[in-house]
């Protein structure tokens, strides 16, 4: 076996270029000249016998091989930082950036209210929450943590079930007073003005045995990709909105309809092994037994409120 050794300096340069997407900007960060950065990337590609970037006038973009190399470069950097921390006795308090990817409803109304205690315990940590209905690609470093409604299947992704959201109908008292009667079942919704989040459209088949028929019956009065717009219209008497039960604690003026739930939807926290091993992440990731949701998310068996981990 040949005694080949990868040059960490070239990996360091590669990582900077990959993170910034520009050799010129990476050179400025590293305090090296652009030709030197370009040369080191060329030498690394030659050593690995693989193209790591595709180059264009707009910058550089990682190839599939480059994405794999970046993942290992990050692991190497984490390991080096851990050795340094152990050697000098550095505090294990969380520092730096933590990126959370999550959906429009859970992010603003379930996660955000629970971050204050975390911020007070770790004042040097910066949380960046990105709201998107598409789950982030954790393996390609789009986020450190994903809060999502599907259980990850990739063996490289670690996940914990955080709980179950129970969806029911809500309306304002003003709207209910304007109607002759309230719906007593899901299939009476077609007599009412209904408000829907776009993400629910893709989930509706999971909600009830005959939900596909329901989707054909109901002509929704308002469909949006904004949870705040949906909730505000409902509060102002615009119709019946399908919402998770914890929203009643957030907005006490909303009236929960006296009928069975539309759907129980499970959600997970997902992250990579690299994230788990990072010292700055260990205090953020909950144990499976930890109640991540607090009182608002915890509920006894059989209740309609959002359940905590293990539900």
Image: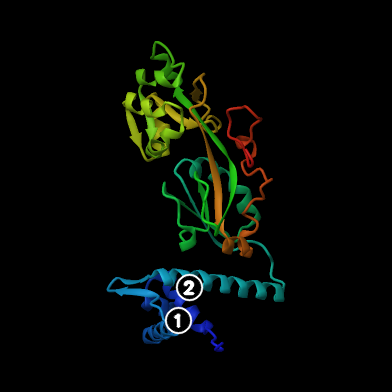
As helix, strand or loop, the secondary structure at mark 1 comes to: helix
- Of tags 2 and 1, the one toward the viewer is 1
The local crowd at label 2, few if under 14, some if 14 to 19, many if 20 or more residues have their Cα within 10 Å, is: some
Quadrant in the picture for the N terminus: bottom right
Q: Is residue 223 above or below residue 3?
A: above
Q: What residue is at 54 percent from the left and 87 percent from the top?
A: 4
* Callout 2 touching callout 1 (CB < 8 Å): yes
Q: Is residue 276 above or below residue 304?
A: below
Name the residue that disc number 1 marks: 48
Question: Distance from label 2 to label 1 (Cα)?
Answer: 10 Å
Name the residue that disc number 2 marks: 69
304 displayed left or right of 50: right
Identify the image quadrant of residue 178. top left
As helix, strand or loop, the secondary structure at mark 2 comes to: helix
Q: What residue is at 33 percent from the left and 31 percent from the top?
A: 222
Q: Between residues 70 and 27, which one lies in front from this camera angle? A: 70
Q: Position of residue 89 (x, y in %)?
A: 72, 72
202 displayed left or right of 156: left
Q: Position of residue 216 (x, y in %)?
A: 32, 27
Colour scheme shown: rainbow
Identify the image quadrant of residue 249. top right
Q: Between residues 172 and 11, which one lies in front from this camera angle? A: 11
């Amino acid at each position: 076996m040949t005694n080949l050794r990868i040059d960490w300096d070239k990996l360091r340069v590669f990582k900077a270029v990959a993170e910034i997407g520009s050799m010129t900007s990476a050179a400025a960060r590293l305090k090296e000249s652009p030709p030197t950065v370009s040369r080191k990337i060329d030498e690394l590609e030659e050593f690995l016998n693989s193209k790591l970037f595709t180059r264009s006038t707009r910058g550089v973009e990682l190839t599939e091989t480059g994405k794999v190399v970046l993942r290992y470069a990050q692991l190497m950097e984490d390991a080096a930082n851990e050795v340094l921390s152990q050697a000098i006795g550095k505090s294990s308090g969380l520092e730096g950036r933590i990126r959370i990817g999550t959906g429009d409803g859970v992010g603003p109304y379930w996660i955000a209210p629970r971050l204050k205690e975390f911020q007070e315990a770790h004042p040097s940590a910066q949380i960046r929450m990105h709201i998107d209905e598409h789950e982030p690609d954790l393996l390609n470093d789009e986020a450190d943590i994903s809060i999502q409604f599907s259980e990850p299947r990739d063996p490289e992704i670690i996940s914990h079930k955080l709980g179950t959201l129970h969806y029911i109908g809500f309306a304002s008292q003003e709207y209910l007073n304007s109607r002759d009667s309230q719906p007593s079942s899901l299939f009476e919704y077609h007599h009412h003005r209904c408000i829907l989040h776009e993400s629910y459209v893709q989930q509706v088949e999971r909600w009830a045995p005959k939900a596909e028929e329901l989707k054909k019956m109901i002509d929704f009065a308002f469909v949006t990709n904004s949870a705040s717009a949906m909730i505000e219209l409902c509060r102002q008497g615009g119709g019946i909105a399908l919402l998770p039960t914890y929203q009643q604690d957030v907005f006490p003026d909303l009236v929960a309809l006296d009928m069975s739930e539309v759907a129980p939807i499970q959600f997970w926290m997902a992250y990579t092994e690299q994230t788990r091993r990072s010292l700055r992440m260990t205090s953020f990731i909950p144990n499976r037994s930890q109640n991540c949701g607090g009182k608002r998310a915890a509920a006894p068996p059989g209740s309609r409120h959002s359940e905590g981990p293990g539900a």
